Amino acid sequence: MNESTGQVGTGTGRESPDNGETLHLEVLWSGPFTIETVISEFDNEGTPPDYGGEDYGLYQIYGRHILCGPDTLLYIGQATGQTFCRRFRQHEHWLRNEEEIVIYLGRIYDSHRHAPSDLWKRWGADVRLAECLLIYKYSPNYNAVSISDPPRLGGYRCVDLIHRGERRKLNFRDSAPVDWV
């Protein structure tokens, strides 16, 4: 919240769902990782009561697809209520049957938007929005939800995702709804 105006935003004065502006989110990607590495090393949930650990966010799973071949984006997901480690334990049963699996982890954090004072609600909403936008745009083979209908932009006119780090096959920038036409 901007203390001087009472408006919610990222601190730049340009982003607010109330005025239909553009939301800018930066995703810092790391990888590639194996499922074993994700399960054994990415379980930092933080400490109570804030749980501000760093092992939450978005992820991409690449592997061999029967029709698309090797190095295919198979799945995009998010870990917000649980760490990457715990989320991938839920994927482990099907990932064990896949070939050439590599995983990339993406973290979103903006100190002007995301804080424990709202119990990380805005952060969670931003991660879920970014996940929906990525699924809709890239249509990974194993995602079934968020592919057919354009996602709602949460009151924003446009949402820009800037990908930094090891983004694999994602564009440097994804802009919704501009990229959908």
Image (cartoon, rainbow, N blue to C red):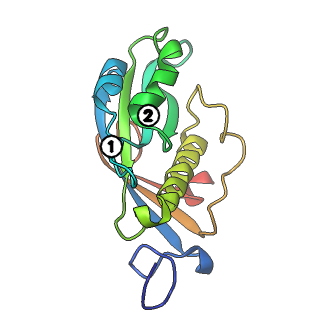
For numbered disc 2, what is the local secondary structure? strand
The residue identified by callout 1 is 29
Q: Quadrant of residue 42?
A: top left
The structure residue drawn at horizontal position 50% and vertical position 86%, both measured from the top left corner, is 6
Residue 155 lies, in percent from the top left, at 64, 69
Q: Nearer the viewer, residue 3 or 147?
A: 3
Q: Nearer the viewer, residue 49 or 162?
A: 49
Is 57 placed left or right of 122 in the picture? left
Q: Amino acid at mark 1?
A: Trp
Under mark 2, the amino acid is Gln
Answer with mark 2 or mark 1, whichever residue precedes in sequence.
1
Q: Where residue 54 sits in the image (x, y, percent)? A: 32, 46
**Quarter the C terminus occupies:** bottom right
The extreme right residue here reads 149
Residue 163's mark?
A: none
Residue 28: x and y in percent read 32, 49
